[in-house]
Every structure is written in structure tokens, then in C-alpha cells.
Image (spheres, rainbow, N blue to C red):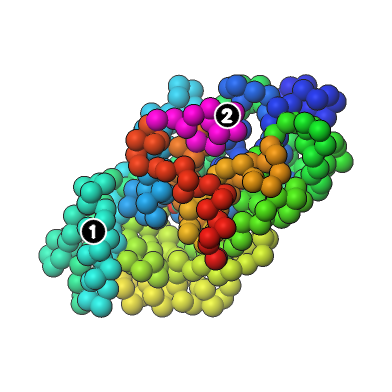
Amino acid sequence: MGAGADPSASNSLDVIVIGAGIAGASVAAELSTHVRVLLLEMESQPGYHTTGRSAAIFAPVYGPQPIRALTRASEAFFLTPPSGFTEHAIFSPRKILMIARPDQEETLDALVEECQAETPVEKLTGSRLAEEHPLIRDGYASSAMLDPNGQDIDVHALHQGYLKQFRERGGTLVTSSTVEGLSKGGDNWTVRAGGQTYRAAKVVNAAGAWAEDIGQMAGAETIRLVPKRRTALMIASPSPQQTDPLPLTVDIDEDFYLKPDAGRLLISPANEDPSPPCDAQPEELDIAYCIDRIERAFDLSVRRIDNKWAGLRSFVGDKCPVAGFSGQVDGFYWLAGQGGYGIQTAPALSRFAAAQVLGNPVPTDILDQGLDPADLAVVRLKDLVS
Ligand SMILES: Cc1cc2nc3c(=O)[nH]c(=O)nc-3n(C[C@H](O)[C@H](O)[C@H](O)COP(=O)(O)OP(=O)(O)OC[C@H]3O[C@@H](n4cnc5c(N)ncnc54)[C@H](O)[C@@H]3O)c2cc1C
């Protein structure tokens, strides 16, 4: 339990945020500048679920257009976080290389054309491609799109930075506190969690893979959220000196990726297997697919797995986040469906959500990147089938 007055003792709260992953931590920090906020987390460690299991990449060319706009709008925060937010840089440069076999050329060309208007990407072939990634097997990839503006993100520093900022601004975090009941009476929500009862005018649902369950508890609309399992393995590098500077390399159809990680290699089959919300674990079949795809594409043979894990990336039908008030119950704000982009978009998405929760205009720097708030609104989901 964090510092501050006992939040269950009075009606002194303005907003209760459910879930202290990156989404909940960042929006709670943004809100706590202006109002009194309680952050409830069911685990003893706030980063235990998806936030602590990511590949930690900032990829400006990744995801649908609204995601790319949020990613660009987040870059300034990553590069220059507020004073005292972290002790060291959150970003370290990591180019992004999206590779294509001859039969995938059309998809690559379409993406190059789409991204060129937004960011300085380059199409590579032949010796330029081999130079950028000498481990790609001869004859496997015919071309690639290179984005020089990718970064590795220090996710732990980012997440802890938001939690620290939240506490410094007077917010209270209660861990090991599972929200079990939500009801609206008069102007206030009553939230039951961890044997306590809390009241606040507004609730923000940042419960990751559990967000649909929280919505049901509140009597809100369904958003057809589907948590999808993604597996990652850490393997030895044949030569850390050679592999550490290599780009994150992704199959253009997202069938696998490989990323150097502090002297080792993080590899993934980029699977998206629907799953109920749970403590996701890697499955043997995913591991076998991963090794097969990586060995086909790269001049590598996987002899030993040093570490393996899985996490749930939660999507609605159009793969864009859901950030907006419920149309069904007053004062209930959805902040869900961040999919595979919740870390790289957190700085902009949290400012967007905080502005809406407070009834303020969306910051213009986010709109200037081409974000249309309607693309995140709950109402759009009526037309989508997931
Ligand atoms: C393998 C993998 C690779 C990824 N790579 C990247 C990447 O490179 N870049 C990127 O930007 N994104 C990446 N992502 C996606 C990113 O990790 C997610 O989008 C992001 O972490 C989602 O954050 P969240 O806060 O919504 O969810 P979570 O971190 O899961 O947080 C939700 C929290 O809600 C809590 N909660 C749930 N129910 C309750 C309840 N009833 N009461 C109280 N608390 C509750 C949970 O305990 C949890 O802590 C990756 C994900 C995976 C799995």
C-alpha cells in the first residue's frame, strides 16, 4: 500500500484506476496532477502481467495509422522525460528492419509507400540488405524496409517512473487488491477490492486482458476484447559483439522476429493465439514454430533456450486501443486494447485519456500527429466484428 490518507475511509477520491500495468500507471500519474486518484492492482507486483513481458521496442512503422500517430506523439516524452522521472535514458537506438521473401514483395512495397509519408524509411535489397543484417540466410529475403528511428525502451524505468511520479503527486497505489465489485449509485462509483470499499466519481478501466470482465462488472457495453498469447524466447548469440548492434528484424507478415538483447537474442514466433485472461505461459508448439521460422530465415541454430515466457496482447477488431467513456454507464472510462503497442504509445495515450477523463480538450500535439479521437472511441466498435 502506498503513502497517503486511507482512501477507503472517506469519499475523498475523484478517480479510481483499475490495473497498474503501463496503461494504469501512466494515466494515474497524468491524472494525479489535477485530481485525487487511487490505483488498484490485484498482483503484488504492478508489472507482473503484459507490461513486464514485452519485447521493449519503439517501432514508429508498426501498427495501424492511429497507433503510428500515438507512437510519434510519444517520442518527445521518451527522449526527454520530465526531470527526476528516471535516473538514465529510457531510449537506446535500435533500427527496425522488416524483411520480405520474393513472394512477400507486394506487401513490403505497400508498407514502404504508406510509411514514407510519415517517417524516413528506406527500401533495401542485395548487398545493402546483407550489410544491415549479415545473419539473414543467403537467398531467404529479397528486400526489406529499414526504419532508422526505432529504439529499445527501458520498460522497467518507464513503468517505475510513472509510479514514482504518481506517488509524488499524492496518488495512492494499493497492490494485492483485486477489484471484485463495481456499482454506480447517485454520483459515485462504489468499488469493492481486497476487502475494502472505495468511492469515486469516475472509474478508469486499465485492466489489460481482464478489461472486458471489469466492463461486465460495471454493466458497461462489451468491446469484444480478445487477449492473444505471444511467446518469446531468449537464446545465446553466436557472437554478441557481432549481433548486439543488429536491427530488430521482423518478417513483413509478422510471422517471427529477432532482436538482440544485451549479448543474447530475443526471438518470437509472433503468435496471436486467443486466450482467456490468465497468467500466460509459453506452449511447446509455439516454441517449436519459433525455432523453425528463425532457423529458416537466419544463419543460426538454436541449441539452448535460456529463458522463455508468454504474455497476452489484447485486441479489439481494428487493433486500435479503446480510449473513451462508456456509452452505457456514466463515469466509466475504457483504457483497453493496447495490443502489441501499449508501451510505445503510453506517453501519448495516457495524456489523451487523462484529458478526456477530466473533460479537457485532447492535447493539440497529439492531434497534430494525425490522430482522430473517433478512431479510439467506444462507439466505433458497434460496426466492428472481432
Ligand atoms: C511478448 C510481447 C511483446 C511485446 N512487445 C511490445 C513492444 O515491443 N512494444 C510495445 O509497445 N508493446 C509491446 N507489447 C505489448 C505491451 O506489453 C502491452 O500493450 C502493454 O503492456 C499493455 O499494458 P496494460 O497496462 O494494458 O496491461 P497489463 O500490463 O497486463 O496491466 C493490467 C493490470 O491490470 C491488473 N488487473 C486485472 N484485473 C484486475 C482486477 N480485477 N483488480 C485489480 N487489478 C486488476 C493486472 O494484474 C495487470 O497488472 C508486447 C507484449 C508481449 C506479450
Q: Nearer the viewer, residue 106 or 385?
A: 385
The earlier-in-sequence mark between 2 and 1 is 1
Task: Say if 356 sits above or below 340 in the image.
Answer: above
Q: Is residue 166 visible?
A: yes
What is the quadrant of residue 13 in the picture?
top right
Task: Say if 199 sits above or below 22 in the image.
Answer: above
Local secondary structure at mark 1: helix
Q: Is residue 299 visible?
A: no
Three-letter amino acid code at the position of disc 1: Val
Q: Position of residue 42 (x, y in %)?
A: 73, 46
Q: Residue at x 61, y 25 (%)?
A: 32
**Quadrant of the image for the C terminus?**
bottom right
- The furthest residue to the left: 127
Q: Nearer the viewer, mark 2 or mark 1?
A: 2
* Residue 354 covered by magenta stretch: yes
Location of mark 1 (residue): 112
Q: Which residues are magenta?
A: 352-364
Magenta stretch secondary structure, dominant: helix
Q: Position of residue 310 (x, y in %)?
A: 56, 62
Local secondary structure at mark 2: loop
